[in-house]
Image: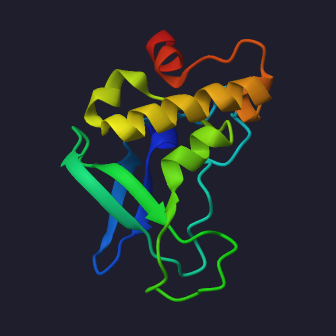
Amino acid sequence: MPHPGDSETVQLEGQRAAPNTSAGVDASEPGHAPLASAPRRPRPRLGGGKVARLDWHKPDRYGRLVGKVWAVLPDARCQHAACPKTLDVGLTQISQGLAWHYKKYAHEQSEEDRERYAFAELEARARRAGLWRDPAPVAPWEWRRSR
């Protein structure tokens, strides 16, 4: 069964809406502390008619496209579908302390992304951002295993 806190359907450039999950990212599940009261998928907002770009490399066993989701910066003045997508949504989640770097699947990321995502998590931990305010946050993969 797919992990509801770990996927989203977004409108892709020139394509249909597609269920996807960010490579190397694992977010809290609905009902899972510490972000149980946060939105289902705490990603930067992709709504408001904005279209995302997904650089995907494989479907997962649930049919979601696994890859890197790119979006228009939330404060960008450009408001149409052709706006440049420069925001790495997964990296942003990790940087804000809204998700873990999912090291189990880090081998599926480029070396550069592995390093950037791992460093972003270390920085978020050091700043005690988001889920790192909790003195003992439980990673989503551990929470799922315990259920």
Q: Does residue 59 appear to the left or right of 47 in the view shown?
A: left
What residue do we see at 51% from left, 29% from top? 118
Q: Where does the image place residue 76, in percent across and percent down from the top left? A: 65, 77
**Residue 139: quadrant of the picture:** top right
Seen in the picture, residue 112 relative to 88 is either above or below; the reply is above
- The colour scheme is rainbow
Q: Where does the image place residue 108, in percent across and percent down from the top left? A: 26, 34
Seen in the picture, residue 96 relative to 20 is either above or below; the reply is above
Question: In the rendered image, which quarter contains the N terminus?
Answer: top left
What residue do we see at 43% from left, 69% from top? 52
Tell me, yes or no, if residue 19 can be seen here: yes
Q: Where does the image place residue 10, in percent across and percent down from the top left? A: 43, 65
Seen in the picture, residue 131 relative to 89 is either above or below; the reply is above
Q: Where does the image place residue 40, in percent across and percent down from the top left? A: 60, 47
Seen in the picture, residue 132 relative to 91 is either above or below; the reply is above
Toward the viewer: 88 or 81?
88
Tell me, yes or no, if residue 41 can be seen here: no
Q: Does residue 44 appear to the left or right of 103 in the view shown?
A: right
What residue do we see at 69% from left, 34% from top? 36
